[in-house]
Amino acid sequence: MFCNLICSDHQQAMAERVSLLTMLAKSQNDLPAKRMKDSYVEVYLPLGSEPKLREKYLNFHNTVRCKHIQTCSFPFLLVLISYSHTYNPALKRSPLSIVTALVDKIDMRKHIIYPDCDIKFTGHVTWVGKTSIEAKMHMSQYHDGTYAPVLDATFVMVARDPENKRAAFVNPLTPDGPEEEKIFQEGEANKSRRVDLSTASLLKVAPTDEERKIVHSLFLNTLDTKTVSFHSRVLPPNSVWMEHAKLKGLEICHPQERNIFNRIFGGFLMRKAYELGWANACSYGGCRPSLVAVDDILFQKPVEIGSLLLLSSQVCFTQGKYIQVRVHSEVFDPLTQQHNTTNVFHYTFVSDRDVPNIIPKTYGESMLYLDGKRHFNQTVGISSTILDFVCVCVEKDEVYVFFYITA
């Protein structure tokens, strides 16, 4: 009975959305250009004046759960920014479905977010393609009589038709002045960077000469000097075999976490993957780690209601106090016994002490090691004090993303 109600509500909502198809622009040239100030928003989170609201955002350290803000507050605000850019006063309802394609970067300016001080969010569109929108958002917190910066974030949103079946055109963006032109060109550079990272994937091309030397060096360091055999391996001191640094979990996907398309909301998947990755890093390092970065989150397939979601986390690279964790999620169909990958997550954590070295045994584990090293170098190489979060999503004819809101 309950399942029938869910399907009925979903069908009714989709039928209402179909009627908006005729309102879509045939080309981007049919839409008026917008300016950056047209999409500017300013929103407050009154943690200081609303104790009941404060409880929702607290963690066990009695500080604000930054991950909760990223997976709950950010999507709504970024979609609001995007709808402000595409707003047409002649229409009572927007025909666009705005989805989050990727989180390009989040720079943490402050490591502690106070639980009893108000937070302010500001943001606007900074770059536009034909169907995609880059938006920047800034978060600051009121403390000692002024608002101090906490983090800066860059997201890429994608416009879809009312049924979320194909891309839809968005208003072009016209920079106003040299400063806005510089911001717009940074968006172009970000797009090129993401393409370069995708084409260099170890799933597509062989490791570089330097990376092959690293793999061979790891192999030589684990050979048993007492034997002349490729199969006799010895674990070096203060090291852990990669196969022993795993942690797994399972989630039953209930309808409470669904979106308008009757599929599981991506923020739920992102939160569960982070919690498993954090627990694995905590177990590996022997203490509570801090999140440094989220990098290269790829969303491949949607997760249906009722799915058995299998999550598998793997420590794939370590250096000093840093722990690189990869979380792989897949859905399992008990009727067909088939496994289908839905998402891959990459997290960088830091411990308060040096952690054991992770050592791969097989070629596949060596590729995981190199991939983890790449993500680690990209994160730490950007800045040793600023925390960057990079999430990559493949934009195809049918794009599946982790946040969805309609106006």
Image (cartoon, rainbow, N blue to C red):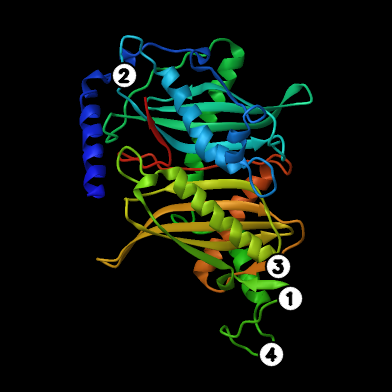
The spot of residue 152 in percent (x, y) is 63, 31
Quadrant position of residue 397: top left
Q: Earlier in the sequence, mark 2 or mark 1?
A: 2
Tell me the SS state at disc 2.
loop
Q: Residue at x 29, y 34 (%)?
A: 164
Q: Residue at x 54, y 10 (%)?
A: 176
The spot of residue 120 in percent (x, y) is 62, 25
Q: Amino acid at mark 2?
A: Arg
Inter-mark Cα distance, 4 to 1: 17 Å
- Would residue 285 be seen by someone viewing this image from the given angle? yes
Q: Amino acid at mark 3?
A: Pro
Which of the two residues, 290 or 234, is positioned nearer the viewer here? 290
Q: Which label belongs to residue 356?
A: 3
Q: Earlier in the sequence, mark 4 or mark 1?
A: 4
Q: Are marks 2 and 1 in contact (CB under 8 Å)?
A: no
Q: Kindly identify which residue carries mark 2.
A: 93
Q: Kindly identify which residue carries mark 1.
A: 237
Which of the two residues, 76 or 56, is positioned nearer the viewer here? 56
Q: Amino acid at mark 4?
A: Lys
Inter-mark Cα distance, 3 to 2: 56 Å
